[in-house]
Image (cartoon, grey):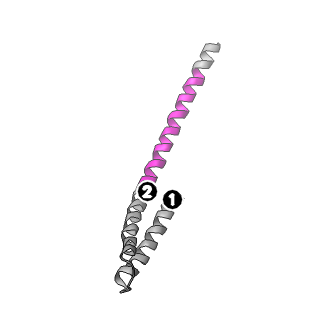
């Protein structure tokens, strides 16, 4: 996991813990603080999306590196042919 993915997971976990405690704990807190629970859910979604796309991005980067290597080999081959 990348740093961003771990950060999303940590914020999601903290949001769930703090939000659940404030919402379901029976504390008398400001109603504005109950927005923490949806923040946890939002960051859970961001964590899941980044976790799923992490493998796809790595695969895409590898494909692009291979294409670039092939293009460089062709370019070097054409320059050698012109020099002869």
Q: Is residue 64 left or right of residue 38?
A: right
First in sequence: mark 1 vs mark 2: 1
| Residue 4, label in figure | 1
Where does residue 20 sit, x and y in percent of width and height? Answer: 38, 78
Compared to residue 43, the image places residue 72 above or below, namely above
Report the residue marked by disc 2.
50
Q: Mark 1–mark 2 contact, CB under 8 Å?
A: yes
Q: Residues within 10 Å of mark 1 (few under 14, many from 20)?
A: few
Tag 2 secondary structure = helix
Q: In terms of secondary structure, what is the magenta stretch mainly?
A: helix
Compared to residue 44, the image places residue 29 above or below, namely below
Query: Which residue range is magenta in the image?
Result: 53-77
Quadrant location of the C terminus? top right
Mark 1–mark 2 distance (CA, rounded to whole Å): 8 Å
Where does residue 68 sit, x and y in percent of width and height? Answer: 53, 33
Compared to residue 2, the image places residue 28 above or below, namely below
């Amino acid at each position: 996991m990348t740093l961003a993915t771990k950060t999303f997971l940590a914020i999601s976990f903290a949001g769930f813990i703090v939000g659940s405690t404030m919402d379901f704990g029976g504390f008398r807190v400001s109603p504005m603080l109950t927005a923490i629970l949806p923040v946890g859910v939002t960051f859970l979604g961001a964590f899941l999306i980044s976790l799923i796309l992490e493998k796809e991005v790595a695969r895409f980067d590898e494909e692009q590196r291979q294409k670039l290597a092939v293009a460089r080999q062709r370019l070097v081959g054409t320059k050698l042919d012109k020099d002869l």
